[in-house]
Image: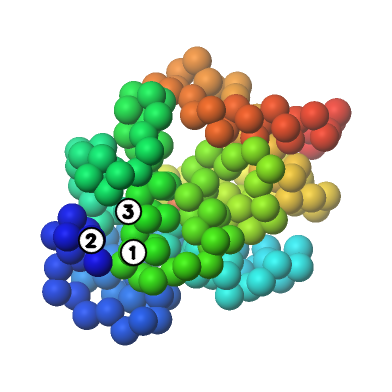
Amino acid sequence: MHPILFTYVGNIKLTGDSILDSSRLMTGLGFMKTAEHSRRVAEEAKRLAQCWGEDESRAEIAGWLHDISVIIPRDQYLPAAEALRIEIIDEERKAPILIHQKLSAFIAQDVFGVNDKLILSAIGCHTTLKIDSSKLDKIVFVADKIAWDQPGDPPYLPQMVLGLDRSLDLAALCYLNYLWRRKDSLPAIHPWMIQAYLQLSKRFTIFP
Ligand SMILES: [Fe+2]
Ligand SMILES: [Fe+2]
C-alpha cells in the first residue's frame, strides 16, 4: 500500500474481500453515510447489470468502491493526487471534488487489490462519465445518480427512470443533460462530461 494511503487506512485489517473490506473501512473510520450510499449504489448497479446483461459481481464491487476516496479529507484531495502521481487537469484544480473519482480508482487498486480494468474504469468516471464509456461505466454512473446521497428525491430521477425503460445511454444522458442545463452555475465543468454529453446527445433526438 502506498504510504500516503496508509496514513488514511491505518491499521484496519483487510481480508481480501473488497466488498466486506470497503464496508468495514468506511464504517470503521466513521463514514456511515458514504457506506450506506455505497451499499445502495452497489445494489442498484447489480440490479442494472442483471437487466442489461453485464457482470453483476463487477457492478457490485465498483458500486461499493466508487466513493472510497471519502477516507481522504477533501482539503487533501489535490495534495494526495499529486503525491500519488495522478494526473490533475485544470477543472479538477478548480473543483477538487471532481478528482475524487480518480482517487477512488487508485485506492481500489492500491489498497483493495482490484486489477480489473473494467471495474477501475467504472469507478474512475462515475461522476463525469467519459467518451466511449463501457456498459459497466454507464451502469455505475446511473446507479450513483439513482441512489444519490442528498436529501429528497433527485430532480432528474423521473426522466432517468423513463430513460432506463429504453436504454442505459438515455438514462445516462438524462443526468448529463441536467448538468448541462446548470453548467453556468457549476464551479467547473469536466471535459470528460462534455465529451460524454456530446457523444450521447447525438444518439437521441427526443429526451423522455
Ligand atoms: Fe462520487
Ligand atoms: Fe456516489
Sequence-wise first label, 2 or 1: 2
* Dot label at residue 208: none
Residue at the spot of label 1: 110
Q: Position of residue 155 (x, y in %)?
A: 58, 37
Residue 73 drawn at (x, y percent): 21, 47
Q: Residue 106 lies in what quarter of the image?
A: bottom left
**What amino acid is at disc 3?**
Ser
Q: Report the disc number at residue 2.
A: 2
Question: Considering the image in quadrants, where does the N terminus appear?
Answer: bottom left
The residue depicted at 58 percent of the width and 61 percent of the height is: 118
Q: Is residue 134 left or right of residue 10?
A: right
Please rate how many residues cluster around mark 2, counting C-alpha atoms within 10 Å: few if below 14, some from 14 to 19, many from 20. Answer: few
On screen, residue 56 versus residue 24, left or right, reads right
Q: Which comes before the other along the chain, label 2 or label 3?
A: 2
Q: Nearer the viewer, residue 59 or 41?
A: 59
Q: Is mark 3 within 8 Å of ligand 1?
A: yes
Give the distance between the C-alpha atoms of the residues marked 2 and 1, in whole angstroms.
Answer: 7 Å
Q: Are marks 1 and 3 in contact (CB under 8 Å)?
A: no
Q: Amino acid at mark 1?
A: Asp
- Residue placed under numbered mark 3 in the picture: 69
Label 1 Cα neighbours within 10 Å, binned few <14 / some 14-19 / many ≥20: some
Amino acid type indicated by mark 2: His
Q: Residues within 10 Å of mark 3 (few under 14, many from 20)?
A: many
Residue appearing at x 55%, y 61% in the figure: 117
| Coordinates of residue 197 in the picture (x, y in percent) | 66, 31
Q: Are marks 2 and 1 in contact (CB under 8 Å)?
A: yes
Marks 1 and 3, the one that precedes in the sequence: 3
